Image (cartoon, rainbow, N blue to C red):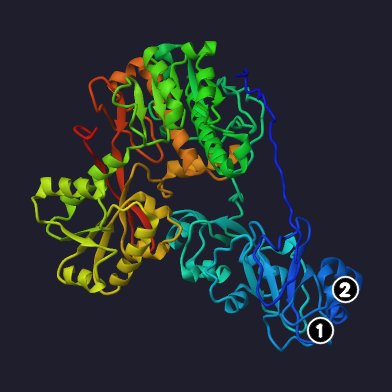
Amino acid sequence: MALNHFKIRTISAVSVFFLFFTLLTSLHAQIKSEDDKTTDDVKKYAYYVAWKGENAFSIARKFNQPVEDFFKNNPQSKQGIHEGDELRIPVPFSIRPDEKLNKSPLRIKYIVGRKETLYAISRLFNTTQEEILKVNPVLKGVLSKGAVLNIPLSANFSAKPSKPAEISSKEYTIVSGDNYYQLQRRFGVSQAELVQLNPALKDGFRSGMVIQLPAKKIAQVEIPAETPSLKVAPTSPKSSAALETMVVKKEVVQPKQLTEKEDNSSHGNLEGTAAVLNKTLKIGIYLPFCQNLNDSVRNSQHSDNFLAFYSGVMLAANKLTEAGMKVKLFVYDTYHDSNVVNTLIKKPEFLSLDLIIGPVYPNDQKIMAEMSAKNFIPMVSPLSSDSHFVSNTPGYYLINPGRKLRLSGTADYISANYFGQNIILLNHGGDSEDEKFLLNRLNQSRGSGKVKEYNILSEEFTGLEELLKADKENIFILAEESEANVSVAMTRLNTISKTHKIKVIGLQEYAKMQSIDIEYLHNTNLHYLSPYFIDYGNSKVNRFIEKYRLAYNGEPSQYSFQGYDIALYFISSLGQSGKVFRGTHSNPGVDLLQTEYNFQKPSPYGGYINRTMYVIEYTNGYEVRCSGKIVTSILNLM
């Protein structure tokens, strides 16, 4: 299934079905859901709320429409129009100058379409974001497809589609960890400019929110609406990489030859590594690019993430070949199907591989782990934190530390930095193994009775206040998994943060929970451990971003950084030591972008677990920063 020299074999097997419903059987005072009113793929519609005594002819005249077109868009109106009926009006439209709309500014409603932003809608109706927010007080800035907005209009209104030439800003989608400070560092835009373009930011940052950035500030920055579809480009004659690829459904690009001058330090200790082995290193990449085609809509984002990961791998391979190494990538689509994986390992080239990256999911890894150990091929688990195979699979590398190791590291971090402070472990009254584990680790290191416990769900709010100390920093430990419970806890702690000095030490999952206001994370000074941290002030990180944009005309995601770091580290290790690097697990001397690997064996007969973790801090100044690094022992944890 793998082809030579970057040729892509594409199997097209996509089956997509669209189901449309008839719109508007009878609309009265109540606004119907999106299932009742769907926006046409070509035309956009607003909804006019009829006054008492109006009819089809008067409304058609109001909006300068032929009555035939009005009936076509609103066939139910032939039976009569009643006060409160909502009638579909194509956008753009204009209103006759002699019409009076001053009875109420809320007589036009609009259903948000896919990926529409508040900024785009305000331009569509020749109004401002501020005016729309005034008449939609519950709106918090994150627009969902199907949401119904009130549109403020005046008598001289004329809706016109905005022209691309007039747009002075570009869209950007907020991701977890974004704040004013991060955006200022990345794009050079001030908080005042952001708020001016995006009034909804006054209510805080939320992951998934689409905002506008000043075009003049980001003239050199490409901000794609989604992960770009990658095209095939010919192999550069200057690159000695030979990549064999097989990708189903998605096309993958070989990075363009990068001609900008690099400083010599960017190669680390790569020079001369090819001479150690003087052979072509064969790397197997096993990723679920397409997954199940019958579930392609739900999994499209996952497929894009794996493409981003592979794009990072290819940039690393290109870098290594520039340093003189010979690298050949065999890339396979596992479809998240263990039967497919079982077929792939029977291919003749499998036994010649020097390194395996993937598969991603534990269910797909079982047979691969068995065969890689049997044939002495190092295997990297690139994204999963499942540690099921690491204890009994030699040569198996687990990149993401599991939950238990992160909790152990959290306990070690608290013991080393906060004993002597007022420490309170929050629980929800259940029998949580994570909370028990944390408490036991803390008691072992500092003695029993030093940590207070409080049930955040069932006990009175005043009970929590009684545990607070005015003369000490109040450290709250939260290991809860349920987003609903975490949301309750963070809301209460945010209130306490206004009157007491507090710090919450929790889990990295909290930064991605949609129901938690990002301001709460900063107000409560959230700390958590993560195996990754991307420092956008680092020159090497910025150089990688520039290369990624040049190669793929898009922005790298964390998956891109992950793919780059894994490929650079492990292929460099192969180049220096061959497969014997499994027993040394020493750093090959390369500069990684978002992590530093430090591997340890959980058992004499198993593989290795990365145990490096960074302390991530949400500051009161709306900065997300790394405030430390710890390396936790994994002995006696497995």
Q: In the rendered image, is residue 270 in sight? A: no
Badge 1 amino acid: Glu
Count of labels in the image = 2
The quadrant where residue 490 appears: bottom left
In this view, 284 is above or below 72: above
Residue 512 drawn above or below residue 492: above
Relative depth, front residue between 28 and 279: 28
Which circle marks residue 54 in the picture?
A: 1
Quadrant assignment for the N terminus: top right
Q: Residues within 10 Å of mark 1 (few under 14, many from 20)?
A: few
Amino acid at pointer 2: Gln
Secondary structure, mark 2, is loop
Pointer 2 residue: 65
Q: Is residue 413 left or right of residue 9?
A: left
Estimate the x, y position of residue 544 in percent, counting from the top left.
49, 40
Disc 2: CA contacts within 10 A as few (<14), some (14-19) or many (>=20)? some
* Residue at the (48%, 25%) spot, across then down: 320
Residue 17: % across, % down: 71, 43
Does residue 579 appear left or right of residue 20 in this picture?
left
In the displayed structure, would residue 589 be above or below residue 342? below
- Residue lying at 36% horizontally and 50% vertically, measured from the top left: 508
